[in-house]
Image (cartoon, grey):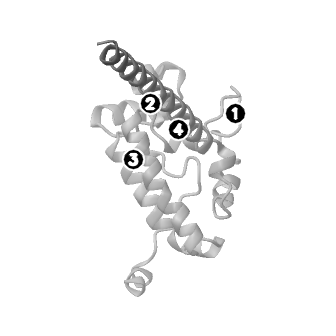
Amino acid sequence: MSFVASGRGTGGKASIIFIAVIFLGGVIFAGLFNVGLALTNEMDFCTSCHTMKVNLEEYKETVHYKNASGVRATCSDCHVPKVFVPKMIAKVMAAKDVYHEIMGTIDTKEKYEAHRWDMANRVWEKMRNSDSRECRTCHDFTQMDFSEQDRSARKRHSRAMDQGKTCIDCHKGIAHEEPDEPDETEAREDS
């Protein structure tokens, strides 16, 4: 009888230890996962690829980099959603940029520029589809004081709000140079 009782006690203890190890492993994994996400959101990481140096230099010339208020929007502020599922989708999609850098598709300024129109349009479409979600973490029509804006901005923002437009509809090229649309002969040659 004592043999059976002691066997049950050992099994219960082993189960508790197993659950504790699994729990601790989960905590460690979650911590490392969050650290990894945070590190891949840093501007130094984003611009570590050679081709992103082009974007970095353009960005340094914009109001998102240097302005009177001292607030700086970084790569992840504009390109990575704050909400978990959209953030994970963005991270997976960003892996293709790393892939194309490694494979040599966009590893020089010339190659990057050759693909820039298509890449920009994909980003603009993503922003349009999300109603410029990342822009709106800082810029939201409902929080704007139109009376403090100049007449042109006040008129355009009010009209955009009424027409259901999103930030990217008017503000392409705000943080990076807007690429030239390829002419029809270039587009046919690439096909």
In the rendered image, the vertical position of residue 155 relative to residue 110, given as above or below: above
Closer to the N terminus: mark 1 or mark 3?
Answer: 1
Percent of width and height locating residue 12: 36, 19
The nearer-to-camera label among 2 and 3 is: 2
Q: Earlier in the sequence, mark 3 or mark 4?
A: 4
Q: Earlier in the sequence, mark 1 or mark 4?
A: 4
Instruction: Count residues near mark 1 (Cα–Cα under 10 Å), then give few for <14, some for 14-19, many for 20+.
Output: few
The quarter of the image holding the C terminus is bottom left
Amino acid type at image mark 2: Ile
**Secondary structure under the numbered disc 1 in the rendered image:** loop
Label disc, if present, on residue 22 of the rendered structure? 2
- Is the C-beta separation of discs 3 and 4 under 8 Å? no
Query: For the residues marked 1 and 2, what is the alpha-carbon distance in whole angstroms?
Result: 48 Å
| C-beta proximity under 8 Å, tags 4 and 2 | no
Q: Residue furthest bottom?
A: 189
- Of residue 119 and residue 47, the one placed in the foreground of this image is 47
The mark nearer the N terminus, 1 or 2, is 2
- Residue position marked by numbered label 3 in the rendering: 89
Q: Position of residue 61 (x, y in %)?
A: 70, 48
Q: What residue type is disc 3 on?
A: Ile
Mark in the foreground, 1 or 3? 3
Q: Estimate the spatial distance between the alpha carbons at disc 2 and disc 3, rounded to whole Å.
A: 27 Å
Task: Measure how far apart labels 4 and 2 are at the Cα level.
Answer: 16 Å
Q: Give the residue type at disc 4.
A: Phe
Instruction: Place residue 42 in its image quadrant.
Output: top right
Q: Nearer the viewer, residue 27 or 93?
A: 27
Question: Which residue is denoted by mark 1 in the rendering?
Answer: 67
The mark closer to the camera, 4 or 2, is 2
